[in-house]
Amino acid sequence: MLTVLLVDDDPEFTDVACTIIEFLGHEVLTAANLAEARDWLNKETFDHVLLDFMLPDGSGAHLFDELDALPKRPRVTLITGHPSVKGIIKGLCGPNIDYLVKPIQREEIEAVLSGKKEQKKDKSGPKIKRHFGHLIGESTPMKELYKLIERVSRTSANVMLLGESGVGKEVVAAAIHAASDVEGPYIATNCGAFSKELIGSELFGHEKGAFTGAVGRKAGVFEQSENGTLFLDEITEMPIDMQPNLLRVLENKVVIRVGGTKTIPVSCRVVSATNRSMEEIAESKVLREDIYFRLAVFPITIPPLRDRKEDIPLLAMYFIEELNKENGTQFEWDQTQLDTLKAYDWPGNVRELRHFVHRAAIMSDPDTSDLELPKTIESPFAKKQSTTPALQAGRTIEDVEKELIYATLEKVNGNKTLAAEMLGISTKTLYNRLHAYGDLNKEE
Amino acid sequence: MTESELTLLSKHVHDARKPLNRISMQAELVKMALNGDVPTERAVEALDKIIASTKACSDSLTTMMTELSDSQPE
């Protein structure tokens, strides 16, 4: 138990603060101004003084000398209404002083009295919201996406998901399933993963003895996802001669197992996905037109990560939290690292980001909370995408300059003197640029 | 913004912060009452005070607006 002196001129505040401090098991006395505080300090010994910075008869700082002169100097916590005063106080009284900034929370009072510098705010940190239980992101493109999901979830329309590789099409499919609130299960299959012979059996099932090796009866994915959601990934990779069979199922809403005769009713929403664009689908004839219209009743394009950069820190924090949970580590991002991640284009989208975070976590010392980032973020797929559109109209000089600088640095293995020479600029200019990109955080 | 306007503004911000601080503390008290740490009547009292403080805060913002626009040169 501590004896606490609370000095503040707002009686309503001191009244409630006393209730809280007493509840925490301490004894508390109050003073409304410096004179009263001096009075108490002469009569009693205190373990801790909570001191308002602005009092009617002067600044709380005036009390410091008297506190120093006491035989047992109490710990002091300054209370201030101005966050900006914090810095000044630190300069005045050294780092050994705690302060509370109004409005004050109970946990903060608890933390200063128990002597813990700063209580970790909620063990797991700020909770990252997962929309529909799956999707992370608060950017405008994602909010749009949530709206579309919400709308389509109320219908039974078939959805086609379009988007680059790694944007999370399967995650969106699962989100649609979750939002739909249907009784049936969520079944996912990849149309590109089966040979021509096997895909029929995968989709529609087969009867015993339908073909060599068909030792038992098997229900296809259409059957399995009864009253649920069927996710057909890489729909454009499905052999074109299998597509009429699929069309029949979609049109008639019945399926016949391979080698069977009985029709089985189909009652699922089909969510299909492709990483090709709509134009590409139309041009390359990988998908029959009639199938496209059956599947893409409601097409949804998922934005690439570079179009929602403000979500990158959220995702990075979420991934590191997951890894921390899995491995019992305490890794935390610092702001400059998050800025570095935000500056990169992520051609491999969220998948690339996740792998990158995973790799960083493996490379870092598990006994510390610091994450170590590789010097450059690169993937073998990055170059293909970044070099082709390099000199197209619509890009800013700044963008192209940045790309050139990084390409040069890569070429000379990060040797900045050499890179500056090749670029025809001074090393100082190069450092300035890299600073501006947020790439130099240490004293390099 | 002139020096005197800034001084005036910071005075009013200080005044507006006082009720905010009260609200935050009273809210903590309500939380404690819901946990059964203090009697329920305290929660009702605290909520009344929160309402009073929101009015006080709103009033001081109004005063600030009036005084700032009065100080504007015509």
Image (tube, helix red, strand yellow):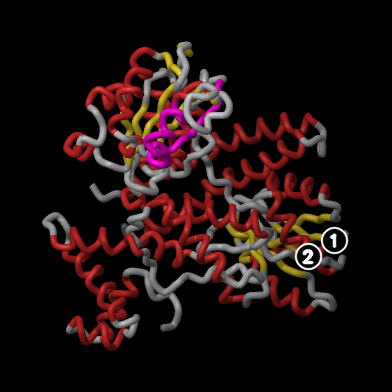
Q: Chain of mark 1?
A: A
The quadrant in which residue A301 appears is top left
Residue placed at 45% from the left, 13% from the top? A261
Give residue A48's mark.
2
Q: Chain of mark 2?
A: A
The magenta segment is: A184-203
| Badge 2 vs badge 1, beta-carbon distance below 8 Å | yes
* Mark 2 surroundings within 10 Å by alpha-carbon count, few (fewer than 14), some (14 through 19), many (20 or more): some
**Above or below, comparing residue B6 to residue A273 in the picture:** below
- Can you see residue A144? no
Q: Determine the secondary structure under disc 1.
A: strand
> Which residue appears farthest toward the left when viewing the image?
A393
Give residue A3's mark.
1
The quadrant in which residue A396 appears is bottom left
Quarter of the N terminus of chain B within the rendering? bottom left
What's under tag 1, amino acid-wise? Answer: Thr
Position of A367 compared to A190: left or right?
A: right
**Above or below, comparing residue A98 to residue A224 in the picture:** below
Residue placed at 81% from the left, 76% from the top? A70
